Image (cartoon, rainbow, N blue to C red):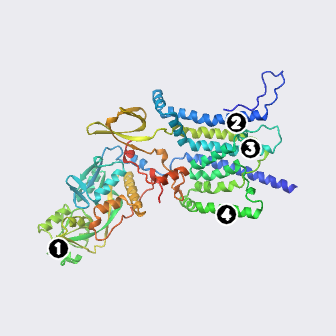
Amino acid sequence: MPEVLARHRIRSLATTLAVALTLTLAAVAGCDNRREPPLPSVLDKLRESHIDGQAKIKIGVATTEPLMGELRNGTHTGFDVEIARYVASSLGFEGDQRIEWVSLATEDRIPALQGGTVDLVVSSFSITEEREKLVSFAGPYFVTTQEVMVPKRLRDRVRTIEDLRRPELKICTSGGSTTEAELEKHQVRAYVVKEVGDCVRGIREGRYDAVSSDETILAGFLSQYPTEFEIVDMPFGTSELLGIGVPIGDPALRDLVAFFLQKSYLEGRDGISSPWLTAYNRTLGPWLKADKSQPQPLNVPKLVDFDDKAPRR
Amino acid sequence: MTAPATLPDTVAPARPAPPPADPAERRARASQSFWTAVVGVPAVFSVLRLGVEAGGELQTTLLLVANVGTVNLLAGFLTTAAALLSTALVAVFALGAVLRVSVDRMSSGMRRPLFARWVDSTPAWFAVASFLLALATWPLLYLPLLLPAFVAAFQLSPERLHEQRVPRLFLLGAGFAGYLWLLGPTLLDAGRQGEVLAVVLLVVPPVLALFVTGPLPAAVIRPLASITEAAVLAMLVWAALPVISTPVLPLTVTTVESAPGVTEDVRGHVVTVDDVDVVLLQERGGVRYLPVDQVRAQVLCPSEDELPRRQLRVRDFHVEDSLLEGLGRRVRPVHRIDAACRTVD
């Protein structure tokens, strides 16, 4: 009999504990339900960034690089431009009426960001340590290599970096580019002009013999003059990580751009057509030797957005 | 809301006290008070929230009253407050059943707690319906709490599974194994993210469900009854505040072209649209009448309250989604946030 009583007592004690714990958990769940989100949201970052409240976003692009950034019949086209449009619309600036395109030469990209002439630069902007001291980068959104483009008549004579050092060859490149530094490193003497387009024009007019730049930019000119030029695969050894330039004083904007690049990257990885892939297929895709995919952006912050609850599969 | 079941006659002490009301009458009164609460609370809330939505302005409230139909109001209320309503009902039924089974074991003469009386007077189908409503509308993360609540409400002790100990343990073990298999990836992910509370909320309630049935010790019943009555009331008030302030009209951004080439984005809730105007209740307050022929575009925007707090999923269902919302997202999986929603404040 005492055993039964003791069992009853234990049982009722267990019930009391269970009821109390359930009520506690329910209370905790209730408090949890009212908690503020621990992670910053896209909207929080937008409010922090300097573009908040602007009627238009100013984006610096190239206007003379076919396939990357070109102004044709008053319309900006190219891979960089498409990426810029995607980032702008993600930031809330949908359509060209809300984008102010600013034409930038290669050497003007950093001063434009520093001086506030532009909010973003999407213009074959390679991420380098030196530049990161002056501006912030989101990305990379493309990995390319440095190559050399020669007129077809020279294709058998220019095959290696050694060939570029020959004094009779006049090599041309654009100023303020990573290519300029890379050629210097390999002791290749180059004529430095403002734009890669000037080099191409110079070759066609007989002033230069070869042009060195990013494969993407060269592919653009190759698409314009497919019968005149050829890209030579040179072992320069360094890969160029193209990033989106952001003023160094606006980390919130950098985080947002990185977040949206990552979003596109994840969509592409999951096999859905991503904005990046669409831009690539419409511009560079058909002109590059090997198919590329979007590289994973670096230093992407964790942000909360409205579509976080959407199914992933 | 509720009348006491019996009132001692204090007005005329010289007269003999009237006989206590018979149980049937008491049940009828308890039932009346319960149904009054179930129907009355949502009705009062629906009207109150219109005042909040209007920003406290009388004329704006009247504009809303004139344009938001009763059916829309009730539907809007149910959409946003179904989880709260079902929580209140589930709490009442679970606590009421626990108190009832405890009081039944005790000597007579003790007044039955309010929740126990409510449980007495409510049909079982209504309790089941409340649990089903909770199942459909509670966020997945809190759904495990429904298990001990259900077990308590219907006093389903583990002995009901099988009269013999070994098969019973086997059945329970299999049930838990299945549960852990379902939640395994989520629990690992929660562990990686350091979400201790999420792990506790997912794992502990099913264990508690094994013990919540049965009577409570006599010493606990009285304080439990009064504390929980107060707590449920407090919860209702506390949780009602956000529900009252949840908009009843959809949030939009409307682009208006007031002069050629001059456009303006207005963020607000659409009250009504007729041949002449689009009437917008601006998010920051005030009503705007926008001529229909000047409206160039209109997009639907999510509100910031919809932002998730966690990044956890159960089999690709977000833990902060209810089953209904999760299923809905499967029907329309692509959700695009319009750019205008981001820039217009």
- Mark 4: amino acid: Ala
Disc assigned to residue A152: 1
Foreground residue, A32 or B43? B43
Residue B251: x, y in percent? 43, 41
Kindly identify which residue carries mark 4. B174
Disc assigned to residue B99: 3
Chain-order first, disc 4 or disc 2 = 2
- Mark 3: amino acid: Leu
Q: Is residue B32 left or right of residue A152?
A: right
Answer yes or no: do the residues labelled 3 and 2 have beta carbons within 8 Å? no
Number of residues whose C-alpha sits closer than 10 Å to that of mark 2, classed few (under 14), some (14–19) or many (20 or more)? many
- Mark 2: amino acid: Ser
Disc assigned to residue B31: 2
Chain-order first, disc 4 or disc 3 = 3
Residue at image x 40%, y 56%?
Answer: A259
Mark 3 to mark 2 CA distance (whole Å): 17 Å
Residue B286: x, y in percent? 42, 32
Element type at mark 2:
helix
